[in-house]
Amino acid sequence: MADARLQCRMYENEFPKADDLVVVRVDRIADMGVYVTLLEYNGLEGMIQLSQLSRRRIRSVKSVVRVGRQEVALVVRVDQDKGYIDLSKRLVMPEEVPAIEDKWNKSKAVHTIMTHVAKKTGHSALELYESFGWEVYKKLGHCYDGFKLAMKEEEKFFEMFNVPEDCKEELMKNIRRRLTPQLVKIRADFEITCFAYAGIDAIKVALKKGLSFHTEETPVSVKLVAPPLYVLTTTTLDKKKGIDFLNSVLEGINQSITEQGGAFTIKTTPRTVSDKDERLLNSLMDQLEKQNQQVDGDETED
């Protein structure tokens, strides 16, 4: 059973305001509309009428929303006395969604830190927000930015905000653990061939072109899986920049090999990979290497 002391809204206002954009979870679909949970407001229930689901004519509600999925919605009306919150998905502009999702991810990270500190110190999450959390939002725009400040200038942060003495150590421990940037590995798979006169030399030149993008910040690695399949990887702190970077490397390899009469095909576009993915790849490469190794009995007799 969830600890009630850890249940708390993410922002100071108990209810959102009309025209606010919020993140909701779809809970159930009814005849009147779609019932949702406002994730930033401690599970307040809201409803999106069927007419507010989409600008387009829809044949099936399930083609627009699905139970369990997160959506960005616009608050249309709030009745705090009755607890009614009417929302619209139709009125949300597509260009607004990325900023709201970014805000949600930051708020979720802050909330995770606050609830962990509350659990460890015996405070309630609400107490922590009231003592310093919402003040950080007011002064710095978002508590996430305040926590990033704390990582750089811990003393300054504690001078600015009234953090309970028995929470400081636990707070900093959680901030460092959860907000310190983590390296991610980005990988793309491609095939490269050249049956022109340059042959294997053209492939070597093209691969060297890819490796020329290598820097300390964004290292480049190219591994042969089995001709003509290669794996291209990099590690980075920024997923989007890493993906864009690998796309540039792939374009460089493509340009080089095609200029020499070869062919280039991307088998898998750049994406993040886990340690499990890497283990599977290394296992596959080991198997292929063993298959290619010459074993006793392979030699022909004179």
Image: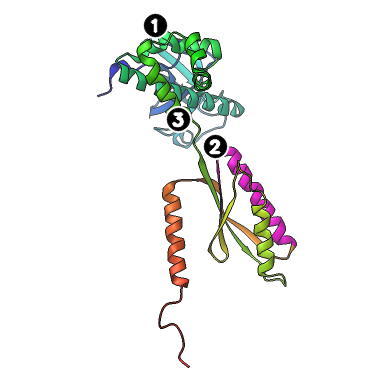
Is 235 colored magenta in this rendering? Answer: yes
Look at label 3 and name its amino acid: Gln
Q: Residues within 10 Å of mark 1 (few under 14, many from 20)?
A: few
Distance of label 1 from label 3 (alpha carbons): 26 Å
The CA span between labels 3 and 2 is 26 Å
Residue behind mark 3: 70
- The answer to which of 105 and 91 lies nearer the viewer is 105
Q: Residues within 10 Å of mark 2 (few under 14, many from 20)?
A: some
- In the rendered image, which quarter contains the N terminus? top left
Contact between marks 2 and 1 (CB within 8 A): the answer is no
Badges 1 and 3: C-beta atoms under 8 Å apart? no
Residue 71: x, y in percent?
48, 28
Residue 53 position (above or below residue 80): below
Does residue 38 appear anywhere in the picture?
no
Asked which secondary structure carries label 2, the reply is loop
Mark 1 belongs to which amino acid? Asp
Q: Earlier in the sequence, mark 3 or mark 2?
A: 3
Find disc 1 in the rendering and name its residue: 81
In magenta, the rendered stretch is 232-259
Q: Relative to 222, is 300 above or below? A: below
The residue positioned 28% from the left and 23% from the top of the image is 2
Tell me where residue 168 appears, x and y as whole percent: 40, 16
Residue 280 in the image: x percent, y percent? 42, 55
Q: Earlier in the sequence, mark 1 or mark 3?
A: 3
Q: In this rendering, would 155 be left or right of 121?
A: right
